[in-house]
Structure formats: C-alpha cells, structure tokens
Amino acid sequence: MSDQASRLRNLVEEQAEEDARAREIGELYFDVAEDTRVIAVTSGKGGVGKTCLAVNLAVALQLSGQRVMLIDADIGMANVNLLMGSVTNRSLIDLLNDEVELQDVVEDGVEGVKYISGVAAIEAALNLNRNEQRKLHKKLGRCSELANIIIIDTGAGLNRNVIEFILASEEVLLITTPEPTALADAYAVIKAYSTYTERRNIKLVVNRIHEEEECEDVAEKINQTTKKFLGLSVDCLGYIYEDKAVLDAVHRQEPFIIANEKSPASRCVTELAKSLLSGERMNSVSRGWRGFLDRLFGY
Ligand SMILES: Nc1ncnc2c1ncn2[C@@H]1O[C@H](COP(=O)(O)OP(=O)(O)OP(=O)(O)O)[C@@H](O)[C@H]1O
Ligand SMILES: [Mg+2]
C-alpha cells in the first residue's frame, strides 16, 4: 500500500474512533428515527419567491396547529428577518461560543413561528473544524424539541451550500415561475440533485401564475425534459397566483397570509400547507432533524 493510502486509512480509522468516543459521552447523536420534518425551499433562479413561500408556508402550518421553525440559510439576504417582523442579533454561528445556547439564537416570530437567522453563518459552518462542527451539531440537535416541522430557506442556484442543504433535507420544494429562464434553472437543480442522490424527494411549486393551467403546463415542460434526459419525473405540490397582496405585504414587512388572509396567494399557500400535511412525506426513510444534521455535517 502506498504511503498516502495508509495515511488516509489511519486518518479514517482515527476519525471513526473519535466519533465512537463522542457517541459514548453523548456528544454525537446516534441515528434515531424521529418525527421532525425537514423541508428545504430552494430554486434555480433567484428572486422567484423562495423567501415569500418559506415564511408564509411556515405561518400557514403554524396556524394549522403545527410547531414550526424557519431557518434562514440564504447567505446573501437577511430577508426572512424582515418578513418575520423583527431583526435578529444572533445567528447560528454564535452557537460556537460556549456561553450561547440554542434558545439564545432562536427568535419568536409571527404567530409563534420560531426562527433562526443563519445569514453569513452557513458558509462558515461548512468550513468548520471537526470540534466546532460537533459543537454546532450538538446544540442544533435540540431544534427538534422546539418544532415538528423545520423549514429551511436556502439561497438560489447551484452553489455548494445550496446543494449541501437540499441533499441533507428530507423533503425539497423547488420553486419556479413560468418564465423560460426560471424553468431552465429549475431543471439544472433537478439534474445536479439527481447526480448526487437516488432519492426522489423534490416537489415543484409554481409561483406567479395567472391561471391554473399554467401550473400544469410548467410541470409538463419540466417533466418532458427530466424524463428525456434524466429518466425521472417530479411531482407538483401546487401553485401560487400572481398577487398584488404579496408585494404589499413585503412592503409592510408582514407575511401576506397574515396581512391579507383571503388574497389569492394566501389561499394558495394554505392549500400548499394542507397538501404537505395530508400527502405522503416525500421520503420514506425518515431520520428527522438529526438525520438532516448528520448528513449536513457528514456523519
Ligand atoms: N405570487 C407573487 N405575486 C406577486 N409578486 C410576487 C409573488 N411571489 C414573489 N413575488 C415578488 O417577488 C419578490 C421576490 O420574492 P422572494 O424574496 O421571496 O424571492 P427569493 O426567491 O427568496 O429571492 P432570492 O433568490 O433573492 O432569495 C417579492 O418581493 C415579491 O415582490
Ligand atoms: Mg430569498
């Protein structure tokens, strides 16, 4: 065996021993089945409505009796903050500080939705050393005590962070508008995703449509391409109408589902929440939030 190969093998063995020790002293979680649903909201093209969907869906689910947590994992923009009506002082990365506990970074948002700002932290989190990762993994593990549905607003596109998040998530909502460029970018996400995993847990949400048929049309166009080039198809969870109430609510820094609960967009999001709750979970192998963290941190 070459020197390099044996060094690598030693490293892997050392890491396995270290992880086993950490499990014994309760620093690392064992793989446990648990019920917390982890749903990532993502898109290929930017600006298609991820944050609006993530925030309003979180509120809709909370209003229907779920305990929801929203994590803003979009590195570029802190807009979940704005829509939830307050500004966080702390983010995920502060958990590395020994004095900071999970409850210190969790904010109470609209209707009691819990949220964590991850802005600028996630990128750093993926480059942490093993000890720091372990600390974050352990403290974040307790999120599942606070919520039974965790929604993650990811950034757009195909950068490493977004891919890591959607690969780790049990369920993925891929949002697109009917514009051809948004469709092409949505296809690119499905393609990238399918090269990394066999799991089929992406559902489409078509935003800014003017009539119901547009949604079917978009799903058909995407599926024609995915079937032809990737040999798979993607289900559509639902749609959201183009609605002036969305922009009005953004200006008022309020979720539209609260500002104007009868607006077409609000009714659509309520339907999406119902479909999520009544339909089958997109992935049968559920390991909940801790499964998500294990995958994200590579355990
Ligand atoms: N259904 C809709 N009807 C009307 N306007 C909408 C709708 N959905 C989104 N918008 C508009 O699009 C804007 C962008 O939405 P949002 O911030 O949710 O996109 P995003 O995908 O999170 O963007 P980014 O990629 O920058 O994070 C909103 O501020 C709103 O003005
Ligand atoms: Mg956004």
Image (cartoon, rainbow, N blue to C red):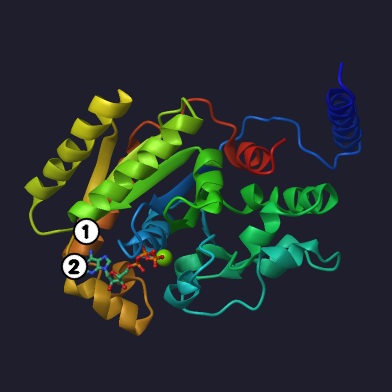
> Residue 117: horizontal and vertical position, in percent?
58, 67
Secondary structure at numbered mark 1: helix
Q: CA distance from mark 1 to mark 2?
A: 6 Å
Labels 1 & 2 near each other (Cβ < 8 A) = yes
Pick the residue in front: 76 or 39.
Answer: 76
Please indicate, yes or no, whether residue 178 appears anywhere in the rendered image. no
* In the image, farthest residue toward the bottom: 252
Which corner quadrant of the figure contains ligand 2? bottom left
Pick the residue in front: 47 or 230.
Answer: 230
Q: Can you identify the residue that label 1 sits on?
A: 267
Q: Can you identify the residue that label 2 sits on?
A: 263
> Residue 69: horizontal and vertical position, in percent?
53, 57
Please indicate, yes or no, whether residue 219 appears anywhere in the rendered image. yes
Q: Quadrant of the N terminus?
A: top right
> Residue 144: horizontal and vertical position, in percent?
63, 47
- Residue type indicated by callout 1: Arg
Q: Is residue 84 above or below residue 286?
A: below
Q: Mark 1: give few (<14), some (14-19) or many (20+) Cα within 10 Å.
A: some
Q: Is residue 101 above or below residue 249?
A: above
Residue drawn 22% across and 51% down?
239
Q: Mark 2: give few (<14), some (14-19) or many (20+) Cα within 10 Å.
A: some
Q: Is residue 171 left or right of residue 7?
A: left
- Residue type indicated by callout 2: Ser
Secondary structure at numbered mark 2: loop
Q: Is residue 158 left or right of residue 246?
A: right
Q: Is residue 90 left or right of residue 259?
A: right
